[in-house]
Amino acid sequence: MSTPLSARPLPQPTAETAAYWAAAREQRLVIQRCAGCGTCQFYPRAFCISCLCERLDWINASGHGRIYTWTVCRIAPSPAFESRLPYVVALIDLDEGVRVVANILDADLTRVAIGARVSVCFEPVSETCTLPQFTLLD
């Protein structure tokens, strides 16, 4: 079945990412931690990026972090995003030491800044998909 051109593209879970997306549906932000060396990592992989160990655990992240960098999208990459304009895409350094990419939702663009504290929120985008996003903390 084809999808309409204006449909928002959704993540396609893989063996490595299925647990991440399942947790997001439960409104939990999870990251991987190596059972061998204790290194935390994101994005999900089949092995530790530090020691190559294949024993990885999923841990709940605090959901708090700081904006590392950001940009404002003012031109939609497809018709599915036109109603969201303008929107902020940011790299977030989580308190656990990993970096994630997400949108900053409902942000006053004058308040978005490098180093600003953020907290995770969850945006349901379909019956089966919830996206971890972020909001600015005061």
Image (tube, rainbow, N blue to C red):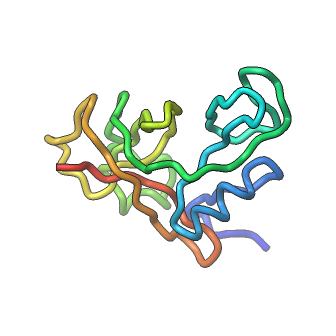
Q: Is residue 48 found left or right of 91 in the rendered image? A: right
Expressed as whole percent of the image width and height from the top left, the position of residue 82 reads 39, 58
The residue that appears at 32% across and 39% down in the rendered structure is 72
Look at the image and tell me whether residue 93 can be seen: yes
Expressed as whole percent of the image width and height from the top left, the position of residue 98 reads 53, 33
Q: Is residue 65 found left or right of 102 in the rendered image? A: left
The residue that appears at 73% across and 51% down in the rendered structure is 17
The residue that appears at 64% across and 38% down in the rendered structure is 43
Total marks shown come to: 0
Residue 26 sits in quarter: bottom right
Expressed as whole percent of the image width and height from the top left, the position of residue 44 reads 70, 41
56 in relation to 49, above or below: below
Residue 84 sits in quarter: bottom left
Q: Is residue 38 found left or right of 125 in the rendered image? A: right
19 in relation to 40, above or below: below
Expressed as whole percent of the image width and height from the top left, the position of residue 20 reads 66, 55
The residue that appears at 44% across and 57% down in the rendered structure is 81
Q: Residue furthest bottom?
A: 127
> In the picture, which quadrant includes the N terminus?
bottom right
72 in relation to 12, above or below: above
